[in-house]
Image: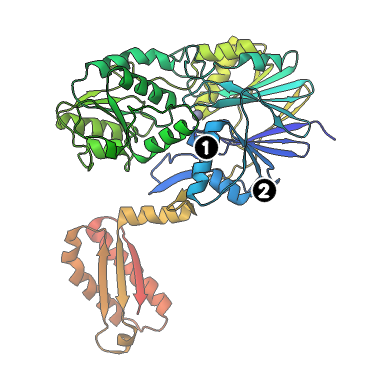
Amino acid sequence: MSKKITLTPIGGVGQIGSNSTLIKYKNEVILIDCGILFPYEDFFDINYLIPDLSKVEETPNKLIITHGHEDHIGAIVHFILQYPEVEVHAPLFAKKLIERKLGHKKMSKKIHLYNRDGYIECDGLNVLPIQVNHSIPDTYGMLLNIDETSIFFVSDFKIDQKAKFEPNFDFEKLKKNSEGKFKILLADSTNIKSKNLHTPSEEDIFPELEEIIKNANGRIFITSFASNVFRIRNFILLAEKYGKRLVPHGRSMINYIATATECEHIHETKVLRELDQIDPNDPKLIVLLSGCQGDFKGAFRRVAKGEDSNFKVKETDTFVISSKAIPGSEKKISLLINSLYELGAKVINNDEAHIHVSGHPGKEDLRILYDQFSPDVAIPIHGETEFLYQHAKWIDDNYPKTTSHVIKNFDSVQIEGTKVTLVPTDSSPEPILIHGQDLPIEKSAISERRKMACNGVIFISINKESLSKRKISIECNFMGLPLLCLDHKEVLLDYLHNFLATRKVKLLEQTSEDLRVETRRFMNNILGYKPITIVQFV
Ligand SMILES: [Zn+2]
């Protein structure tokens, strides 16, 4: 049997999100991660996008999850519904998050746990999880060993040598198990453009967070990524040290803290309270708010807009934005900050204090990985197309003996011994749009929504029985059009009456189409655009 291994990213390359990579070897068809992509343009209430697996001919028999971020596990419900027999492997924190996700859908699935010392049994392929640091507990890269070839796949990582709540990047296991082999690296490109050459440690922001918490006279509201459990753990330490009480507010903050407590990443503490155990006006209160990206349904937004039923902003409040705006969220967040200033609160943003760090490697962190692993071939992943090319250039400039390749989603990398062949795809399917109760929706339907939203709608209904009478009964209703259209309604109806009077109504279908065209033409003269027009005979 061929000893060829094929890697095909179906998401996460040329984009930040929907991380998913297919690995084929002998009888194994393994998917590493199955994440979602957050909408990158206005898709009209689309919740998220998932990779389209319809082009994948084989049925995946294993799903290996590297960590619990939504862009790595978010599509798992859809995936398990599509492949119910798949064997799922995950580290503890991701396992608990997935179980919670499946529980919401009244689904269940055995999830095999792996840890820092473990390996995942596959047919002739040795899969070794390598623990790394990131911005969520229990994050791993995967070392895939076949005979004399080692492939290290590490989509999200940082090197945090000061990490106090988890072990450091496990270079020892990585080196021990790849020594002397032909090595291929697929690594994180997220921060390749960052001016921060070394991504600071989570502990580097502790002193400034401590100063803020120590010196605040009133309540403190902190918004940060709810999945950044170790930062939350530091907030708990500071609350304990300065006699504060800490309450999570917002569904995702409550859920992540509950899951982290279950996994013992957060320990039981009397400073951590629930909403009904606190006085909302307690000046010793720290409120952890979810929705740090200004999400429309998030707690941060509700509080900052004065729309929260539990917390009303006061002049003695301090708001701490311990997160970074992801592209596309900047305006939403700055509007909330403006609103907080208007309400008289003090705001400390991450551009004026060192209160947020990334979970991805700067160039000097990448250098540590490249020096430790010494890849013969390197393929940038986890980044927009520009990042991948910049990462490849950095490899070419710094590691001339390493061959770099830039790939896109659905391209395949075939590896056999020391031979690496790229097989470009001729077409890559568009991701699937998910909305409502996790249901797919076609792009054509989104396009219709866009037209309705931008152009408004006119409903024309004609009484069929009246067609044979002298006066035809026509009704007209507008939706999403300016009020001034009402002034033209009678003229439009007269126009349509005259139009019908000049022709014999035989074919309803043709008449309906003619009326639609005439109405749109009439409205175009008034508005300068043509509303969607629906004509019905009733
Ligand atoms: Zn991640």
Q: Is residue 129 left or right of residue 337?
A: right
Task: Using the image as rendered, state which of residue 404 and residue 85 is in the foreground.
Answer: 85
Against 433, residue 504 (above or below) is below
The answer to which of 256 and 125 lies nearer the viewer is: 256
Instruction: Look at the image and tell me in which quarter the C terminus lies.
Output: bottom left
For disc 1, the neighbor class at 10 Å (few under 14, some 14 to 19, many from 20) is: some
Of the residues under marks 1 and 2, which one precedes in the sequence?
2
Q: Is residue 147 left or right of residue 164?
A: right
Q: Residue at x 40, y 41 (%)?
A: 41
User: For the residues carrying marks 1 and 2, which lies nearer the camera in this image?
Assistant: 1
Residue at numbered disc 2? 85
In the picture of the structure, the residue carrying the numbered disc 1 is 96
Cβ of mark 1 under 8 A from ligand 1: no
Residue at position x 72%, y 13% from top?
179
For image coordinates 61% across by 30% down, the residue present is 407
Image height of 87 relative to 119, above or below:
below
Q: Of helix, strand and loop, which one carries label 1?
A: helix
Q: Quadrant of the N terminus?
A: top right
Residue 370 at x, y percent in the picture: 61, 13
Mark 2 secondary-structure assignment: loop
Residue 123 image position (x, y, % from top left): 77, 34
Q: Is residue 248 visible?
A: yes
Question: Tell me, what colour scheme is on the image?
Answer: rainbow
> Distance between the Cα atoms at labels 1 and 2?
20 Å
